[in-house]
Image (cartoon, rainbow, N blue to C red):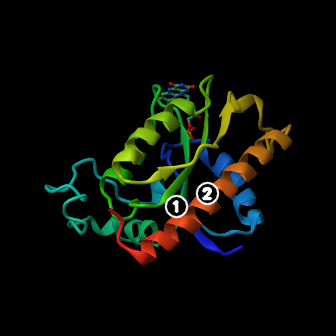
Amino acid sequence: MSTLKLAVIVGSVREGRFAPVVTSWFTDHAVRHGGFEVDVIDLAEFDLPLALPSVSPAMDPNPQRPAGMTDLTRRLGEADAFVIVTPDYNRSFPASLKAAIDWHFTQWDAKTIGFVGYSGASGGLLAIEGLRQVFNELNAHTVRNYVSFPRYYLLFDAEGNLMEPEEPAAAAQAMLDQLHWWATALTAARSLAPAM
Ligand SMILES: Cc1cc2nc3c(=O)[nH]c(=O)nc-3n(C[C@H](O)[C@H](O)[C@H](O)COP(=O)(O)O)c2cc1C
């Protein structure tokens, strides 16, 4: 199995967030999968202004970006595949994620994306479905399988371990297998011709 670059993006940036627990659980599985070199990108570490450049990154792929975004742009560009770890906020995804997405275009173009969701009753699924629509416009392919943790506070213990780990582990494995297949295909396709 060839090794591809997987960026795991932490979508929540708020103080006291639960995101690191879910991200750490997923990253362990991604590393153990064996098909990826894993880079964890925590959006809380970057400058992500809501005021976007005057021309869309779809039309100008190198707009002037804040200095505090340089490392984020480089790491998104280097990734062959992404997994976005997202909660539901008011039936959608965090604004931090939308800003990170909208500041970029070529970094997503013709790449594949998977999701790990968590929240109250809706388990991140409303954010995930919204993100699928957004990534259509970025010419990215979102994979069918996903991981969802509804009422995550009933599923993880105080040390951040899942009390019943088998089913989520199988879901993560299935999603990672799909991501690897798509990332292999799309990496080869991008090397033959620029994405259309
Ligand atoms: C502004 C806000 C809106 C939320 N909306 C929802 C929601 O629509 N559905 C849901 O199941 N949980 C909702 N929640 C609960 C969050 O998913 C939960 O607080 C989760 O811990 C957020 O992830 P984080 O701690 O990593 O930021 C909301 C939380 C916040 C702060």
Residue at left 51%, top 70%?
187
First in residue order: circle 1 vs circle 2:
1
Task: Provide residue 183's location: percent of width, then percent of height.
Answer: 56, 64
Residue at left 48%, top 52%?
141
In the rendered image, which quarter contains the N terminus?
bottom right
* Depth order, front residue of 7/48: 7
Q: Secondary structure at mark 2?
A: helix
- Taking the image in four quarters, ligand 1 sits in the one at top right
The circle drawn on residue 179 is 2
The circle drawn on residue 41 is 1
Residue sitting farthest toward the top: 121
Q: Secondary structure at mark 1?
A: strand
* Depth order, front residue of 21/193: 193
Residue 6 in view of the camera: no
Task: Provide residue 37's location: percent of width, then percent of height.
Answer: 64, 72
> Going by the image, does 158 lie left or right of 78?
right
Type of amino acid under label 1 = Ile
Say which quarter of the image contains residue 185: bottom right
